[in-house]
Image: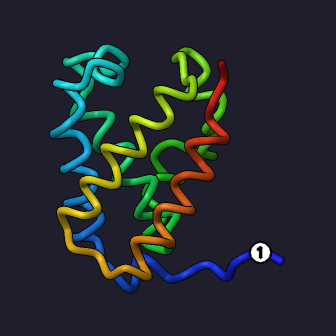
Amino acid sequence: MTEAELPIFQLLGADCLTAIVAGFYRRVPQDSILGPMYPAHDLAGAEQRLRSFLIYRFGGPPDYLRDRGHPRLRQRHAPFVVDQAARDRWMQLMMASIDEQQVSAEHRAYLERFLGDIATFLQNR
């Protein structure tokens, strides 16, 4: 039996999701594992794409689909080495950003499971 999806967009709102993504990308450039994966010239673009994807995926406006089409997450991440270390660091930085936003324990646990499943799915090495 799968866990029911929470209406995260409705519960947290666009501002909170935007702040979570911004907090994550604020940490990326200094990170020894993830930093090299993100070209400096496209950091703002990567932030916009993740923000748009999460807002759409969590029940907000479907701007991501309009702008980018089907997510095709594995295909889009194929050029990058996403091993266990990269997966774990992505989660570490994302959860630090979620904690910074003081998300409730229930919503934090849901986000950790949801994002952790996606991060594991994207591992390609």
Indicate the quadrant where residue 77 lies.
top right
Circle 1 packing at 10 Å, graded few (<14), some (14-19), many (20+), is few
Left of 55 or right of it: where is 48?
left
**Above or below, 23 relative to 43:** below
Q: How is the image coloured?
A: rainbow
Please name the residue that numbered disc 1 is placed on.
2
Left of 44 or right of it: where is 70?
right
- The total number of labels drawn is 1
Write the residue at 16% across / 24% down. Answer: 30
Task: Say what amino acid the circle numbered 1 marks.
Answer: Thr
Write the residue at 19% across / 50% down. Answer: 23
The location of residue 71, given as percent across then percent down, is 59, 44
The location of residue 32, given as percent across then percent down, is 27, 18
Front residue of 103/12: it is 103
**Above or below, 108 relative to 115:** below
Front residue of 43/63: it is 43
Write the residue at 50% across / 74% down. Answer: 59
Write the residue at 19% across / 37% down. Answer: 27
Local SS, label 1: loop
- Quadrant of the rendering where the N terminus is positioned: bottom right
The location of residue 8, given as percent across then percent down, is 44, 77
**Above or below, 76 relative to 56:** above
